[in-house]
Image: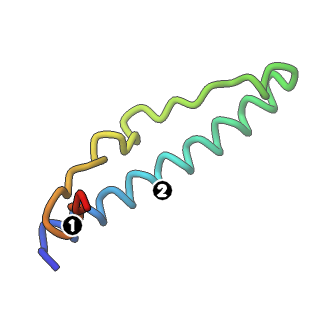
């Protein structure tokens, strides 16, 4: 496997894990501070969003044939 591709995947996993931890912590905080509105709180990953990594590895292993 390409070392750069491996590093990108590792970085994406790290960012996703950090975002999940932050989201769980935020939901717990919302439950304590405002239990009535906690179910309606929205997710905000901030800098821990992995959306920027989506589709970065468009090499030959990811391409699908049109057949």
What residue lies at 48% left-to-right and 46% top-to-bottom? Answer: 19
What residue lies at 78% left-to-right and 26% top-to-bottom? Answer: 38
Give the residue number, with chain letter if any, for mark 2: 17
- Residue 19 is left or right of residue 51, and the answer is right
Q: Position of residue 48 (x, y in %)?
A: 40, 42
- Residue 7 is left or right of residue 29, and the answer is left
- First-in-chain label (1 vs 2): 1
Give the position of the N terminus as an image quadrant.
bottom left
Q: Nearer the viewer, residue 67 or 14?
A: 67
Q: Which mark is residue 60?
A: none
Distance CA(mark 1)–CA(mark 2)? 15 Å
Mark 2 falls on what kind of element?
helix
Give the residue number, with chain letter if any, for mark 1: 7
Q: How would you rate the neighbour count of disc 2 (Cα within 10 Å): few for under 14, some for 14-19, many for 20 or more?
A: some
- Residue 1 is left or right of residue 35, and the answer is left
- Residue 42 is left or right of residue 56, and the answer is right
Please tell me in which quadrant of the rendered image residue 24 appears. Answer: top right
Q: Position of residue 12 (x, y in %)?
A: 33, 56
């Amino acid at each position: 496997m390409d070392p750069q591709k491996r590093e990108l995947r590792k970085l994406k996993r790290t960012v996703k894990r950090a975002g999940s931890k932050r989201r769980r912590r935020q939901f717990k905080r919302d439950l304590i501070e405002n239990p009535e509105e906690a179910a309606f709180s929205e997710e905000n990953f901030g800098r821990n969003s992995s959306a920027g990594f989506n589709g970065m590895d468009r090499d030959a292993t990811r391409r699908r044939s049109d057949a």
